[in-house]
Image (cartoon, rainbow, N blue to C red):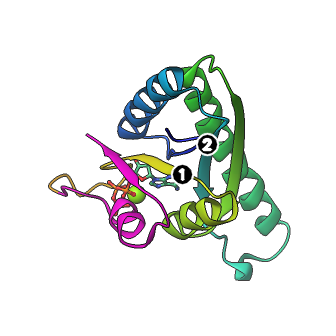
Amino acid sequence: MFDKILLAVDGSEHALHAARIAAEMARGMKPKEFRVVVSYDIIPIYLGEPNLQFAIDSRKKDAEEVLSTALKEIGELPCEIHTELLEGDPATAIIDVANVRKSEIIIMGSRGLGRLAGLVLGSTSQKVVAHAPCPVLIVR
Ligand code: ATP
Ligand code: MG
């Protein structure tokens, strides 16, 4: 039904739960491609060198670890798996990837790494639901 699945992960248990559901869906649906997106915060330019490069490298490394943990959770799929690591606001990054790659469904957690315990739906999920170009599955 959905040939191009986009999964967004941020290193939270919620996102890993979404990853398991997305992988099960992909095993049943046999899509053409499965894409995993993670974004990391923009580093303020005023940090200056060498701190700027150090900060960029460290955030990229963290984001790569988030991706590799998610890939382990996903396991083997009957389709190509792509990964995207982007800098900037996560909701904007997810929506941009969905537009450029023509994703047919976005799968993400209801909450993420944010610390506001009472929140029902995190701000990234809210923004993606509001502006996505395709259906969005919010996993609880
Ligand atoms: P907030 O960020 O508003 O404090 P939160 O962190 O609890 O709240 P969200 O950020 O909305 O909630 O996270 C919900 C889902 O959005 C996550 O489970 C994940 O699927 C996705 N997500 C959040 N941040 C990122 C990110 N940096 N990169 C990719 N996906 C993300
Ligand atoms: Mg968040």
Are circles 1 and 2 on residues that touch, CB within 8 Å? no
Given the current orientation, which residue lies at the most extreme right position? 50
Is 26 placed left or right of 67 in the picture? left
Look at the image and give the residue range highlighted in magenta: 119-140
Picture residue at 59% right of the left edge, 21% below the top: 72
**Residue 22 circle label:** none
| Element on which disc 2 rests | strand
| Element on which disc 1 rests | loop
* Residue 48 vs residue 94, the one in the foreground: 94
24 part of magenta stretch: no
- Image quadrant of ligand 1? bottom left
Q: Position of residue 139 (x, y in %)?
A: 31, 41
* Residue 38 vs residue 103, the one in the foreground: 103
Picture residue at 59% right of the left edge, 60% below the top: 98
Is 7 placed left or right of 47 in the picture? left
Provide the residue designation for mark 1.
104
Provide the residue designation for mark 2.
36
Picture residue at 72% right of the left edge, 76% below the top: 47
Looking at the picture, which amino acid does disc 1 mark?
Glu
Q: Is residue 123 above or below residue 106?
A: below
Looking at the picture, which amino acid does disc 2 mark?
Val
For the C terminus, the image quarter is: top left
* Residue 38 vs residue 22, the one in the foreground: 22
Q: Position of residue 91 (x, y in %)?
A: 49, 66
Q: Is residue 47 above or below residue 140?
A: below
Q: CA distance from mark 1 to mark 2?
A: 13 Å
Given the current orientation, which residue lies at the most extreme bottom position? 46
